[in-house]
Image (spheres, rainbow, N blue to C red):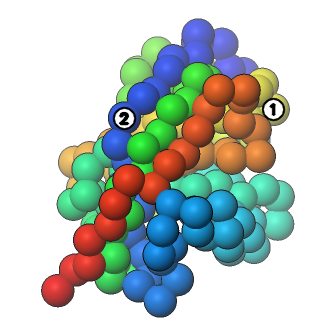
Amino acid sequence: MPDPTPSRFAGVTFHAGAADQAPASPADLPAYLDHVLAHTRTEGGRFNPPGAFGALYVSLDAETARQESDAPEVVLEIDALLSAVYDLTRSEAQQHCGLTPAALCARDHEPCRRAAEAIREQGYEAIRYPSAAGDGINLAIFWDRRRDGSSLRLAGQSRNR
């Protein structure tokens, strides 16, 4: 199914979550990622079926991260460098996967999960897609599929009041 050429992503991303689990320093980010990936592996998400694999969900702006989160107590700024991103903000990539803009935002996640399984198996490390909660853009990062040279680094955090 996946065919489009992988795109690169380099920039700041945002992840909102519970304050009591947020990493206190950049050195704590790997343990935090392990926790988040274990949680999403169990619970599933738009682009990962429960029990199959985990995904780190981040947004390209802080407000979208807050809108997407169930517990937006703290917003982490994470510098990301990714070399193999499948861009579902492009209509031709959506069509290639049999997805529509409506399917990307629907409550039924099965079409997105099926597409993500195929995309991930083709070696992509992330999917770029439109937010279902607002006007922003998100990334679902399959950290276990990261390529050499890809990285995530905690750049900062802010607490919501």
Assign the N terminus to one quadrant of the image: top right
Task: State the separation of the CA atoms marked 1 and 2.
Answer: 25 Å
Q: Nearer the viewer, residue 97 or 38?
A: 38
Q: Secondary structure at mark 1?
A: helix
x, y percent for residue 73: 33, 82
- The local secondary structure at tag 2 comes to strand
Q: Nearer the viewer, mark 1 or mark 2?
A: 2
**Which residue, given by chain and number where applicable, does mark 2 sit on?**
11
How many numbered marks, from 0 up? Answer: 2
Structural crowding at the residue carrying mark 2, measured as other residues with C-alpha within 10 Å and reported as few (<14), some (14–19) or many (≥20): few
Question: Which quadrant holds residue 133?
Answer: bottom left
Three-letter amino acid code at disc 2? Gly
**Is the Cβ of the residue at disc 1 closer than 8 Å to that at disc 2?**
no
Residue ID at (67%, 40%): 116
Would you say 134 lies left or right of 30 here? left
Q: In this figure, which residue is indicated by the disc labeled 1? A: 121
Residue 89 seen from this side: yes
- Is residue 109 shown above or below 75? above
Percent from the top left, x then y, of residue 18?
44, 83
Of 130 and 32, the residue lying toward us: 32
Left or right, 54 with reference to 93: right
The tag earlier along the polypeptide, 1 or 2, is 2
Q: Is residue 88 above or below residue 46?
A: above
* Above or below: residue 12 compared with residue 125: below
The residue shown at (34%, 60%) is: 156
Residue type at numbered disc 1: Glu
Query: Seen in the image, is 22 located left or right of residue 74?
Result: right
Q: Is residue 88 above or below residue 26?
A: above
